[in-house]
Image (tube, coloured by chain):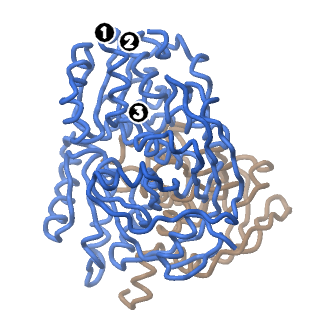
Chain colours: A brown, B blue
């Protein structure tokens, strides 16, 4: 996971958990059943357009609202490699790492990118966009381990020699 | 260096004498609440563990409150999974008793505890000086299996309250004003601590309402100084405090706000964000299709009394559905005893069983395309109460009831 590139989708501030997955679809059986409805109140076509390895770049307070863990699970199931935002709501932050979804905070990138641009993420170091570098903070090793394992439960199984 | 209430609770739960913001500690949890929003997911993950076990079953409380009674075959299956697991493992289990946070306040929470709830509004427990924080089902599972978890010590915002709310102004107006002031992420990752002389003028219902909504400013937890009103509440409910912590005089705050309660006015939060607040008078005349009085934020007896006082002898506007949903069975019974349920029914309101109802937008009272709801619920996100193109305004029980009578947004002095 040291370095990866991807096409970006740009979203605004305060993308809440009811936007990420509206309540009415939570009763569906699996995350795969739910994922076509991701972001549907805002951009109903978006879930169908996202490809494996794409990246979301958003404004402040991404993931605010409910503690529903289906929100990061669905973003991951859509194939999103990581979400980069100005800031994340705290419950969503924990839930994302626990489900193996990488989150990166950066104040500046959102203001300069356009949807469809390509960026390269050098994990724990910087993001590269049109030959300009945007520094990012280093993640604690335990969070890196959890993301690499695919989530907290998988990381615990690995740690305890169950997988 | 002195510590805030949040820091003292974390220090006690971590078994250390001092903590400071930014430290990460492994903490022992006192209580673990989960509801039918995500418990089925926790059970699925639990069953995938090798030799799964529960660290201390007495700490677990499971509450079915989001879809009660069950609204579909799919929900029935997830409720059954939760009910069967609780029974098999001896977990405290409530169904139809009320909204989880109200049930927790009435039956379980006490001062000084550290509580994880698999629901974002768990911060309500700060009303009695408990550190409640919302987590996802994976964090919940980890805590359920190990008995502990990790916490980053949050910075604390301090709110010094002075004065007294004016007649016709409610705790809901106060907390919406605060969220409007600091913004929907103004307290992200932080604790919000309330104290000062003005706190003593607020009853327990007010305090729960204020703490409950702090997550809408991004807060990790909300905490109020424990005074005689809080201690009396615990005593009436048959509980003793675990610890009564007070912030030290030299505690370190990220920011201190002084709020004079007498300056607060009736407020409405407009669609689609809790911090889009305006003076209620600015929304007067806005068409509504439905009004909702209920939820963990404003479904207590004090809220029902405020609504009943306004609607007594009047009628719900014929073009409006007015849903009245007591937050718990205890509240419901109290409202029956006081004749409040009769008052609402005579006025033409639809009185329903205790549950999350339209606040969570999948069960009762969902609104259709282009419809407008005025609500005492917790959130007004786009699509929160039903169709993606519908609109939710948040306000106090008094403003919601007055609006139900007028058929458009109105304040209590207008009816």
Indicate left or right for B206 with B344 as reference.
right
On what subunit does the disc labeled 3 rest?
Answer: B
Residue B311 coordinates in the image, percent (x, y):
34, 15
Q: Which residue is mark 2?
A: B405
Indicate left or right for A99 with B83 as reference.
right
Label disc, if present, on residue A121 of the rendered structure: none
Q: How many residues crowd mark 2 within 10 Å: few (<14), some (14–19), many (20+)? A: many
Compute the Cα span from label 2 to label 3: 21 Å
Callout 1: SS: loop
Q: Residue at x 45, y 46 (%)?
A: A21
Position of B344 relative to B72 (above/below): above
Q: Residue at x 20, y 43 (%)?
A: B70
Give A98 or A127, whichever is nearer the viewer.
Answer: A98
Callout 2: SS: helix
| Res. B116 visible in picture | yes
On what subunit does the disc labeled 1 rest?
Answer: B
Callout 2–callout 3 Cβ contact below 8 Å: no
Callout 1–callout 2 Cβ contact below 8 Å: yes
Q: How many residues crowd mark 3 within 10 Å: few (<14), some (14–19), many (20+)? A: many
Give B6 or A52, whichever is nearer the viewer.
Answer: B6
């Amino acid at each position: 996971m040291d370095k990866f590139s991807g096409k970006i989708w740009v979203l605004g501030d305060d993308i809440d958990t009811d936007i990420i997955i509206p309540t009415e679809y939570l009763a569906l059986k699996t995350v795969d059943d739910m994922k076509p409805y991701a972001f549907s109140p805002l951009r109903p076509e978006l879930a169908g357009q996202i490809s494996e390895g794409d990246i979301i770049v958003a404004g402040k307070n991404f993931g605010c609202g409910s503690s529903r863990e289906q929100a990061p699970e669905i973003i991951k199931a859509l194939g999103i490699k990581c979400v980069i935002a100005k800031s994340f709501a705290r419950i969503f932050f924990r839930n994302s790492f626990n489900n193996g979804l990488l989150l990166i905070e950066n104040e500046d990138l959102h203001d300069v990118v356009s949807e469809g641009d390509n960026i390269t993420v050098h994990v724990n170091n910087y993001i590269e966009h049109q030959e300009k570098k945007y520094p990012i903070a280093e993640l604690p090793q335990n969070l890196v381990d959890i993301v690499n394992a695919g989530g907290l439960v998988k990381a615990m199984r690995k740690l305890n020699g169950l997988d | 260096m002195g510590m805030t209430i949040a820091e003292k609770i974390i220090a006690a739960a971590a078994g250390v004498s001092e903590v400071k913001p930014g430290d990460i500690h492994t903490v022992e949890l006192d209580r673990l609440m989960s509801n039918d929003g995500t418990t089925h997911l926790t059970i699925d993950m639990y069953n995938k563990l090798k030799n799964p076990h529960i660290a201390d079953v007495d700490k677990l409380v499971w509450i079915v409150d989001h879809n009660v009674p069950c609204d579909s075959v799919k929900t029935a299956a997830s409720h059954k999974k939760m009910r069967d697991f609780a029974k098999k493992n001896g977990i405290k289990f409530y169904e139809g008793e009320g909204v989880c946070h109200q049930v927790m306040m009435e039956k379980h929470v006490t001062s000084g505890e550290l509580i994880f709830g698999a629901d974002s509004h768990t911060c309500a427990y700060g009303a009695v000086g408990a550190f409640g924080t919302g987590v996802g089902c994976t964090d919940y599972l980890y805590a359920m299996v190990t008995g502990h978890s990790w916490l980053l010590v949050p910075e604390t915002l301090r709110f010094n309250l002075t004065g007294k709310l004016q007649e016709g102004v409610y705790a809901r107006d106060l907390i919406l004003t605060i969220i409007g002031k600091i913004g929907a992420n103004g307290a992200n990752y932080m604790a919000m601590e309330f104290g000062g002389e003005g706190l003593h003028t607020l009853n327990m219902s007010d305090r729960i309402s204020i703490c409950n909504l702090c997550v809408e400013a991004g807060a990790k937890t909300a905490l109020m100084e424990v005074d005689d009103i809080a201690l009396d509440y615990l005593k009436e409910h048959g509980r003793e405090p675990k610890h009564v912590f007070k912030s030290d005089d030299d505690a370190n705050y990220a920011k201190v706000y002084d709020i004079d309660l007498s300056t607060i006015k009736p407020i409405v939060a407009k669609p689609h964000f809790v911090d889009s607040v305006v003076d209620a008078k600015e929304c007067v005349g806005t068409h509504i299709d439905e009004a909702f009085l209920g939820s963990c934020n404003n479904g207590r007896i004090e809220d029902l009394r405020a609504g009943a006082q306004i609607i007594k002898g009047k009628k719900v506007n014929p073009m409006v559905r007015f849903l009245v949903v007591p937050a718990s069975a205890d509240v419901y019974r109290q409202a029956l005893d006081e004749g409040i349920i009769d008052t609402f029914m005579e006025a033409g309101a639809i009185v329903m069983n205790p549950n999350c109802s339209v606040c969570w937008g999948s069960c009762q009272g969902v609104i259709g395309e282009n419809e407008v709801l005025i609500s005492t619920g917790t959130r007004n996100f786009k699509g929160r109460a039903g169709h993606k193109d519908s609109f939710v305004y948040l306000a106090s029980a008094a403003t919601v009831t007055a609006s139900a009578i007028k058929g458009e947004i109105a304040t209590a002095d207008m009816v």
